[in-house]
Image (spheres, rainbow, N blue to C red):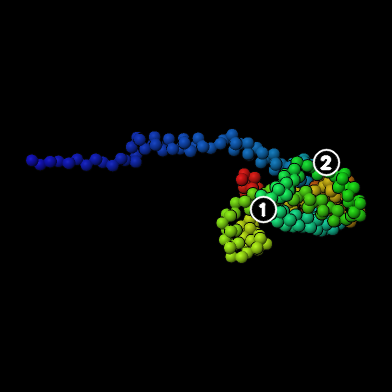
Amino acid sequence: MATTTTLEAPPDAASPQAPKRSLGSLARRLAHFNWLGGLAGWIWLGIVMIPIYWIVITSLKTQNNYFASNPLVPSKDPTLDNFRLVLDNDFAHYFTNSVIVTLGATLPAVLVSFMAAYAIIREGHRWFLRSTNWLFLMGLAIPLQATIIPIYLMIIKLGLYDSLLAMILPSIAFAIPLSVIVLANFIRDVPRELFESMRVDGASEWVMLWRLAFPLTRPALVTVTIYQGLVIWNNFLLPLVLTQSPSKRTLPLALWTFQGQFSVNVPAVLACVLLTALPILALYIVGRRQLVSGLSGGFSK
């Protein structure tokens, strides 16, 4: 008796069930999109970009063109005279002062914070280091504005008033607490077995600090350096209170004096704003990913 076998045809991709499956997967993918968050993000981008756009186009206008034209319409005859005017009024000198203060405060603060964070993590069982860690935490709760009068009196007593060092020393002090906390969280994640193996090989704490902890926490060091550099560069209160001579002004304070000098010439003021913000913008673009990932990683641990 002959038996017949029937072969079942494979499911056709064009069968009625295939569109249902594709539509279902598409609906699931669309459900994961945060439409409200995306819309809010685009709105916020527009809110941020409009003032930047206005600053750029206004800095390229003449004073007469600024008052005679629509503020949001670019000039038909853009000019760089406002930038020349700002550069001719000791802008390079103010820029040099800002670089000296920023580097002179950021590098020592990060170096001291790195060594302090290493000591707290490696020798945290000692009561002195535990109390020092709490002291750094308390330092985050004290704003600069609340201590500006004692800082002013100490700078006067030290004979440092109206000098770049008068801005560098307080900047170092206020940069250390946050830097220690961020770096300590990264050093804590270094496996303790690595330290023990190096100790067995005869390495001292100083050798382990620079040959083990430093390479493994380099991303955190870059993050802290960029963040503190941005904060110190934009500091306005310390130069305002602790300096008096025009030769000791930094860019934020010089921007304020430009605003007084060109109180009617709005395009010149905005040209100074643009020149002041360009180094910060370039630094942020270079280290944006490192800054965001390092800070979020440090505080989330």
Mark 2, secondary structure of its residue: helix
Residue in the picture at 79% in, 50% down: 173
Q: Which label's residue is closer to the chain start, 2 or 1?
A: 1
Q: Taking the image as drawn, is residue 80 in sight?
A: no
- Residue 29: horizontal and vertical position, in percent? 48, 38
Reading the image, the residue beneath label 1 is 123
**Closest to the observer, 271 or 27:** 27
Instruction: Indicate the amino acid at tag 2.
Output: Ala
Reading the image, the residue beneath label 2 is 146
Task: State left or right for residue 15 relative to residue 149.
Answer: left
Residue in the picture at 91% in, 55% down: 159
- Residue 134: horizontal and vertical position, in percent? 72, 45
- Classify the position of the C terminus by image quarter: top right
Q: Residues within 10 Å of mark 2 (few under 14, many from 20)?
A: few
Task: State left or right for residue 187 relative to residue 154.
Answer: left
**Closest to the observer, 239 or 169:** 169
**Closest to the observer, 108 or 86:** 108
Residue in the picture at 74% in, 57% down: 107
